[in-house]
Image: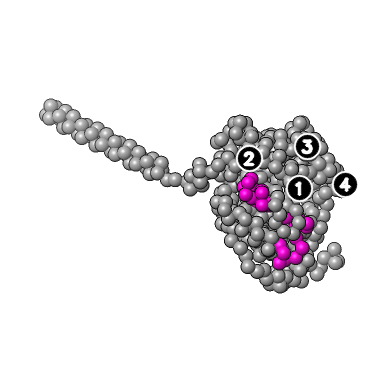
Amino acid sequence: MNYKLLLIIIVLSIVVVYGCESYNNQAVKDQDHIIDQDADIVDPLKEQIAQMTIDEKVGQMVMVGLEGYEKDQYSQEMIEKYKVGGFIFFERNIRDAYQTLTLINSLKEANKENAIPLFIAVDEEGGRVTRMPEEFIKLPASRLIGRINNEELCFKIGNVIGEELKSLGFNMNFAPVLDIDSNPANPVIGDRSFSSNEQTVSKLGTATMKGIQTNVISAVKHFPGHGDTSTDSHIGLPVVNCDLERLKSFELVPFASAVENGADMVMVAHILLPEIDEENPATLSKSIITDILRSEMKFDKVVITDDMTMGAITENFDIGDAAVKSIMAGADIILVCHDHEKQVKVLEALKQAAVDGIIPEDELDMHIYRILKLKQKYNLNDEKIESVDVEKINEKIRDILGKDFCALKFL
């Protein structure tokens, strides 16, 4: 009996071992099949980037301003030769709704030979920072909106600003301002901020961003916080003497909220924070862009600089060197709002840095991927817009102002 029992045990053991081995072999084969399937999945954006020339890649990393009410030889050159990623408009480019629409259409038409559509951007915050044609009803400054302190209202204002911009052909707004109005001596922020309270700025700024995003890209600004400065970065380099702990508990609070709620783009300011980086302003600082914004705050989308022709940069740095340093610090797009020669210098400096390997190819492609991903997300194209219904948008603005702002005169 013992021999028979032993024989049965041996046979059963062989069956179990063989069965498990067969199962494991099949599992390995199935896993290999899954890996093979994953390997076969192609990312169209990566394929597109692999086909791009160095000029096309560098061009996507630069946005420029232009002069006048019509496309000129310089803006044409920026498109044809340098293949820039987009344009920013100022008051000098906007006379009325029809002219603005016509200018934007002409830029899009010129860009049709290029494979990648343009960013067409503007600073439209409301209040004193507005670029919209006179036909549109003006919206109040953020400080006034902050006094009402209503998220739904902020969403509606962001939504109508986005609709207004989109109707003219814009696809990006450098707004809202997420700076906290913490320094009464600040010459550049002031009523552009929602409040001196970080939670109020966080709540209202995020709601406004979401409203804007229903129609166009929103770039929140000015990271890591321009509120506690007493120098205008258009003229000189502001210094903020606070450490990382203070930043995290105050200035960064609104930006953290925006990132957590789906911010697509962050604009970095030309401010020096010597407690964090004693040599480089935020736009050139790896400690601030890569270590804080990207690593600690987990922001993996597009970072753009403030205008590199501002005094904070031009009075202290060579603009070409600064552009390269900014990209190496973690920025994706260099904004050059004025001066054709400076724009060319930035483009050529970036190209040379890419050719020389100072900007490694894999890092260059990573920047381009973020940019193209954003253009894809908002389904950007260079199709013309035939007309704009100003009255339709004004009616929406009247509705917002009539319902929510009549009480402001008592505040």
Which mark identifies residue 294? 2
Which mark identifies residue 316? none
Label 3 and label 2: CA atoms lie apart by 18 Å
Which mark identifies residue 272? 3
Q: Is residue 341 visible?
A: yes
Label 1 and label 3: CA atoms lie apart by 22 Å
Which residue type carries mark 4?
Answer: Ala
Mark 4 lies on residue: 185
Q: Earlier in the sequence, mark 3 or mark 2?
A: 3
Q: Which residues are magenta?
A: 75-100
Label 1 and label 4: CA atoms lie apart by 27 Å
Which dot, 3 or 4, sits closer to the camera? 3
Which residue type carries mark 1?
Answer: His
- Categorize mark 1 by other alpha carbons within 10 Å: few (<14), some (14-19), many (20+): some
Q: Is residue 303 visible?
A: no
Q: Residue furthest top?
A: 3
Left/right placement of residue 53 relative to residue 168 reads: left
Q: Does residue 128 show up magenta in the picture?
A: no
Frontmost residue, 35 versus 330: 330
Label 2 and label 4: CA atoms lie apart by 31 Å
Which residue type carries mark 2?
Answer: Arg
When asked about the image quadrant of residue 61, the answer is top right
Q: Residue furthest right?
A: 185
Frontmost residue, 70 versus 190: 70
Screen quadrant of the C terminus: bottom right
Label 3 and label 4: CA atoms lie apart by 17 Å
- Tell me the SS state at disc 2: helix
Q: Does residue 81 show up magenta in the picture?
A: yes
Mark 1 lies on residue: 338
Which dot, 1 or 4, sits closer to the camera? 1
Which residue type carries mark 3?
Answer: Leu
